[in-house]
Image (spheres, helix red, strand yellow):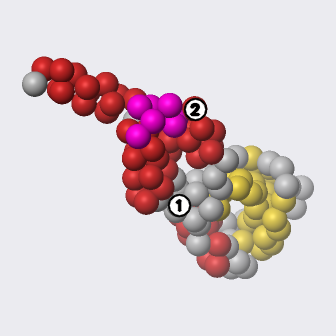
Amino acid sequence: MKKMLLYCLVLGSLCGCSVGMAVSGKPEPNLSVVKEKAKMGEVELNIGSAPVKMLSLPNGYLLCVYKYEVGNTPSPGRAALHGALDILTLGAWEVIGTPVESLVGQTHYVAVTYDNDDRVVEVKPTRTP
């Protein structure tokens, strides 16, 4: 009985990174809200983060660059698969599973210009912050 408990504890501790990464993905942002006349608060709420870069423009406008991720929504199915493979391989799957999970999703940036009333005047996809 003690050996079985110890075995379960060891296996449970080996299931880790890939399972956690699959469960903790981020939902994709609702970019349809990021359009002219939208308020800054609405944009940040729907993108899900604060700007990674802010720049005051000479005309008094504010340029904000936001970072968001697509293709990495939380997935209980992927997590269960990683967990099962961890158990079947006695934890060796983590050597493959963790790097595979780290490649899921793509990072994108969008530059949003706000007027003096914090309303969107321009939206442009950008490659870098």
**Is 35 displayed left or right of 88 in the figure?**
right
| Label 2 SS | helix
Q: Badge 1 local density, few (<14 within 10 Å), some, or many (20+)?
A: some
Tell me what residue is drawn at x 57 percent, y 32 percent: 95
**Is 117 displayed left or right of 122 in the figure?**
left
Callout 2–callout 1 Cβ contact below 8 Å: no
Q: Where's residue 50, x and y in %?
A: 61, 51
Q: Where's residue 80, x and y in %?
A: 40, 52
The part of the image, by quadrant, that contains residue 32 is bottom right
Does the magenta run of residues contain 95?
no
| Label 1 SS | loop
Q: CA distance from mark 2 to mark 1?
A: 22 Å
* Magenta segment, prevailing SS (helix, strand or loop): loop
Can residue 113 be seen here?
A: no
- Which one is in front in this view, the residue at disc 2 or the one at disc 1? 2
Please, which residue is most extreme toward the right here? 58
Q: As rendered, which of 124 and 105 lies closer to the eye? A: 105
Tell me what residue is drawn at x 80 percent, y 48 percent: 129
Tell me what residue is drawn at x 41 percent, y 58 percent: 76
Q: Where's residue 41, x and y in %?
A: 56, 64
Eyeballing the image, is 7 above or below 70?
A: above
Tell me what residue is drawn at x 52 percent, y 56 percent: 26
Give, as a single range, the part of the protein colored magenta: 88-94
Q: Badge 2 local density, few (<14 within 10 Å), some, or many (20+)?
A: few
Q: As rendered, which of 25 and 60 lies closer to the eye? A: 25
Q: Which residue is mark 2?
A: 95
Q: Where's residue 96, x and y in %?
A: 60, 38
Label located before the other in sequence (2 or 1): 1
Give the residue type at disc 1: Thr
Q: Which residue is mark 1?
A: 73
Q: As rendered, which of 109 and 37 lies closer to the eye? A: 109
